């Protein structure tokens, strides 16, 4: 293996560095972008159940939920601001979702860049190897084929090395991009379901029934009925006269 790296020339150094970076990013993102770590399946049900049983969730508990997972950050933020109404709650949840998606995309663009430049480095090694071969021919390499073979081997080795690095990097880049899209869709689904359940169970500040307003409306209706009754009695007395 080391002999191939030496035969490829100095351009093998950046190609090897790109391969190490790509491997580290793939391992790190594969560990991070797991659904059970980013968006636990039963987190929303647990929050809604606790909210229905206790009527509210303490700020300390919600902060603990925010720090554990990305989905927990979004849902707990919504519950922290639900007292200010649906519009404020939705706005803060969208802001946190944008932050979380940006964090999930960490180093993904680097992986795409490695997949793009690795073949170019291999192509550059190919060009330099062919150039060295032609220079060897002009220097009398027809009598010494080993001088010609050195340039050809450099061209082939760097091309192969660049493709070996680029193909897995591009595959992983596309895979992680799709995984982030799926996770973002899961964020939107869980947030929408939580808002719907808050409506259904009357847990939003704007959907909770107001006793004072209902009493006021009842009193107003009674006053109106009394006023109508007084008008009817006045009309009867006038007619009798």
Image (cartoon, rainbow, N blue to C red):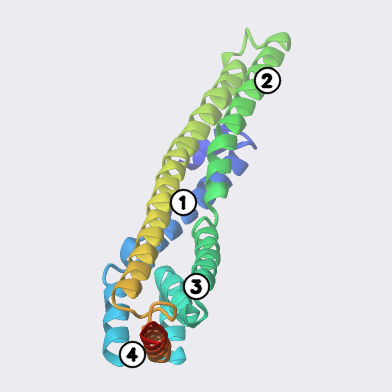
Q: Nearer the viewer, residue 164 or 104?
A: 104
Disc 1, SS: helix
Residue 67 showing in the rendered view: no
- Any mark on residue 135, and which? none
User: What residue sits right under mark 1 in the picture?
Assistant: 23
C-alpha gap between disc 1 and disc 3: 40 Å
- Any mark on residue 132, and which? 2
Disc 4, SS: loop
x, y percent for residue 203: 36, 80
What residue do we see at 55% from left, 65% from top? 95
Q: Decide: is 140 above or below 45.
A: above
C-alpha gap between disc 4 and disc 3: 18 Å
- Any mark on residue 89, and which? 3
In the rendered structure, are the residues bearing label 4 and label 2 in contact, judged by CB atoms less than 8 Å apart?
A: no
Q: Would residue 50 appear left or right of 205 to someone viewing this image?
A: left
Circle nearer the N terminus (4, 2)? 4
Q: Decide: is 83 above or below 179.
A: below
Q: Among all residues in the image, which is located at the extreme front? A: 241
x, y percent for residue 204: 40, 78
**Which quarter of the figure is the C terminus placed in?**
bottom left
C-alpha gap between disc 4 and disc 2: 78 Å
């Amino acid at each position: 293996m080391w002999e191939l790296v030496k035969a490829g020339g100095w351009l093998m150094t950046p190609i090897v560095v790109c391969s190490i970076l790509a491997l580290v990013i793939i391992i790190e993102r594969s560990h991070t972008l797991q659904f059970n770590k980013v968006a636990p399946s039963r987190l929303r049900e647990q929050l809604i159940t606790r909210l229905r049983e206790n009527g509210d969730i303490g700020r300390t508990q919600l902060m603990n939920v925010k720090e554990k997972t990305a989905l927990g950050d979004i849902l707990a933020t919504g519950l922290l601001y639900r007292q200010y109404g649906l519009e404020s709650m939705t706005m803060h949840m969208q802001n946190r979702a944008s932050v979380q998606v940006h964090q999930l995309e960490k180093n993904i663009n680097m992986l795409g860049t490695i997949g793009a430049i690795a073949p170019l480095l291999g192509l550059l090694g190919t060009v330099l190897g062919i150039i060295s071969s032609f220079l060897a021919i002009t220097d009398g390499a027809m009598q010494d084929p080993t001088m010609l073979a050195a340039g050809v081997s450099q061209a082939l080795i760097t091309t192969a090395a660049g493709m070996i690095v680029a193909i897995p990097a591009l595959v992983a880049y596309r895979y992680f991009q799709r995984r982030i899209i799926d996770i973002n869709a899961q964020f939107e689904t869980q947030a929408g379901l939580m808002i719907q359940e808050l409506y259904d169970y009357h847990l939003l500040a704007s959907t909770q029934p107001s006793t004072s307003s209902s009493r006021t409306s009842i009193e107003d209706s009674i006053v109106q009925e009394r006023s109508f009754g007084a008008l009817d009695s006045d009309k009867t007395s006038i007619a009798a006269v």
